[in-house]
Image: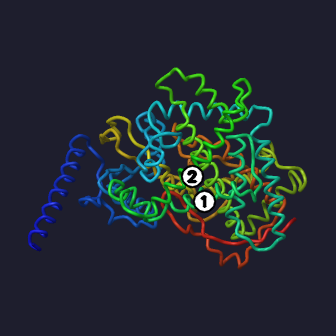
């Protein structure tokens, strides 16, 4: 019996390996994929990757195989693009061919291809066009986006003043502010920072953002068809995603009772008006499932990315007090300590603007962007990439490029200043990615980061609990996103 069991197992393994080899052979013959390390059956090139720092592994492989190479994550081939020239060529010059969204099963299996970030084809085009137009219209409305952000910045300061210069962890409070801005856009309202519903929503968003880098989630993305049937953290992850969707659907029910299509109050009203307008179109993309997932996308991307950047930023300003002092001096000189900062001040604050850009460059929040995919068999340089193949454009390889930034591994605002101290633009600043798949909320995120950071620095000095030289600024995890290490600080009123 034992011999029979062993024989059966050996047969299953052999058939599986042959099947995988067959798939790889077909992919290689159907296209002409770039070179790369030889994959093993089932695990692909997993042995060549450090799951605690995948971007570093990808950069290391680029030194051996060049700026375009193929890597297998499990059984699926992925083309890695390393360096500004090759990423620009793909996402800008051949942008229509690299327009697809690559697989991220841990999220896809819940969102099922709906929404704004993980949709494809015509659905993606319709949702992105609608969302861009709606955000743009809010920017020109009775209460502009800038006014909403300024209002939330004031509320944030009031909340932070309650710390009375005592040590605290800024993770939660810094996430409340951008989350409330999204609440204002989605359903024309904001929450008090101690509201129980708000606290629950923040908990859902924060836990999933923290977990998306975990080894378990990465394993799920490699072998979703197997792991989805096993117990594990992916079940909790999916429940939290559903929790955010259900929160939005409750707000949708409230809006449906008071909807006036002639006077939309917010994103949900605008979407519901389109649902009514296209109710006879059986192929319409305007339905509640798309609305719920679009709202979830805006919440997650609009809250956690901005708050994590701010959290990293405060840590860096404590690490480099001389930089913080220069920002304080510039703010005092240009706008004083009582006039609320506004976007029109940005041109008059070159050093502060350079610091904000350097924070985003240095932390490279999304080192490899979100995965792209080619929408057709695509000729790229000397290769042919088969339709549907995932593509990783390495944003870290651009923002840490030594040819553009003299000391890429060092935090230095001088990277964005010319010899006269004026702000210096560069095409190598790509925290929001490039091309048509670039972040839909880029302009809002830029506004929030500027107004929140300047308002905080106008009112407070950031004090570390340890000597600045002893502060750890290395990401606690590096994968899809870079997350800062936990820390506490004191905010001393100025």
Count the numbered circles shown. 2
Residue 180 rendering spot, x and y as whole percentages? 72, 49
Q: Is residue 389 above or below residue 260?
A: below
Residue at 70% x, 30% y is 259
Residue topped by disc 1: 206
Q: Is residue 320 above or below residue 296?
A: below
- In this rendered view, identify the residue nearer to me: 326 or 126: 126
Crowding near the residue tagged with mark 1, few <14, some 14–19, many ≥20 C-alpha atoms within 10 Å: some
Residue at 43% x, 64% y is 232
Image mark for residue 243: 2
Image mark for residue 489: none
Q: Is residue 414 visible?
A: no
- In this rendered view, identify the residue nearer to me: 54 or 89: 54
Q: Residue furthest top?
A: 280
**131 relative to 162 in the view: left or right:** left
Task: Label 1: state its secondary structure.
Answer: helix
Residue 175 rendering spot, x and y as whole percentages? 68, 57
Residue 236 rendering spot, x and y as whole percentages? 50, 60
Residue 494 rendering spot, x and y as whole percentages? 87, 65
Q: Which quarter of the rendered picture does the N terminus lie within? A: bottom left
Residue at 45% x, 41% y is 113
């Amino acid at each position: 019996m034992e011999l029979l069991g062993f024989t059966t197992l050996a047969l299953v393994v052999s058939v599986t390996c042959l099947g995988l080899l067959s798939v790889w052979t077909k992919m290689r013959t159907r296209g002409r994929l770039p070179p790369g390390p030889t994959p093993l059956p089932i695990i692909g090139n997993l042995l060549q990757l450090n799951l605690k720092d995948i971007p570093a592994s990808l950069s290391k492989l680029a030194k051996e195989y060049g700026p375009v190479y193929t890597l297998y994550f499990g059984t699926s081939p992925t083309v890695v693009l390393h360096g500004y020239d090759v990423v620009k060529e793909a996402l800008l010059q051949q942008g229509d061919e690299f327009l697809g969204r690559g697989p991220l099963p841990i999220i896809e299996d819940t969102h099922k291809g709906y929404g704004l970030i993980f949709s494809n084809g015509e659905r993606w085009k319709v949702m992105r066009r609608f969302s861009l137009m709606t955000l743009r219209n809010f920017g020109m409305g009775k209460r502009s986006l800038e006014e909403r952000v300024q209002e939330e910045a004031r509320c944030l300061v009031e909340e932070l003043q309650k710390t009375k210069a005592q040590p605290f962890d800024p993770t939660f409070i810094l996430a409340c502010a951008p989350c409330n801005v999204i609440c204002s856009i989605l359903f024309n309202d904001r929450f008090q920072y101690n509201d129980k519903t708000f606290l629950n929503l923040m908990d859902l968003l924060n836990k999933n953002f923290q977990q998306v880098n975990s080894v378990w989630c990465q394993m799920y993305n490699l072998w979703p068809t197997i792991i989805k049937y096993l117990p594990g953290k992916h079940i909790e992850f999916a429940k939290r995603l559903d929790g955010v969707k259900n929160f939005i659907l409750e707000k949708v029910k409230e809006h449906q009772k008071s909807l006036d299509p002639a006077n939309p109050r917010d994103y949900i009203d605008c979407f519901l008006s389109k649902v009514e307008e296209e109710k006879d179109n059986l192929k319409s993309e305007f339905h509640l499932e798309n609305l719920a997932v679009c709202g979830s996308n805006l919440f997650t991307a609009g809250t956690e990315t901005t708050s994590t950047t701010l959290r990293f930023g405060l840590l860096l300003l404590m690490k480099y007090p001389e930089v913080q002092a220069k920002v304080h001096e510039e703010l005092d000189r240009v706008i004083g300590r009582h006039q609320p900062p506004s976007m029109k001040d940005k041109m008059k604050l070159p050093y502060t603007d350079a610091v904000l850009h350097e924070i985003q460059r240095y932390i490279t929040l999304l080192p490899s962007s979100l995965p792209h995919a080619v929408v057709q068999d695509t000729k790229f340089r000397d290769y042919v990439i088969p339709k549907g193949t995932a593509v990783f454009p390495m944003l870290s390889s651009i923002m840490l490029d030594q040819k553009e930034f003299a000391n890429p591994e060092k935090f230095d605002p001088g990277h964005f200043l010319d010899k006269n101290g004026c702000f210096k633009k560069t095409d190598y600043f790509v925290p929001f990615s490039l091309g048509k798949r670039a972040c839909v909320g880029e302009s809002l995120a830029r506004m929030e980061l500027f107004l929140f950071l300047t308002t905080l620095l106008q009112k407070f000095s950031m004090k570390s609990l340890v000597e600045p030289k002893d502060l750890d600024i290395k990401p606690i995890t590096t994968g899809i996103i870079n997350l800062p290490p936990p820390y506490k600080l004191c905010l001393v009123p100025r």
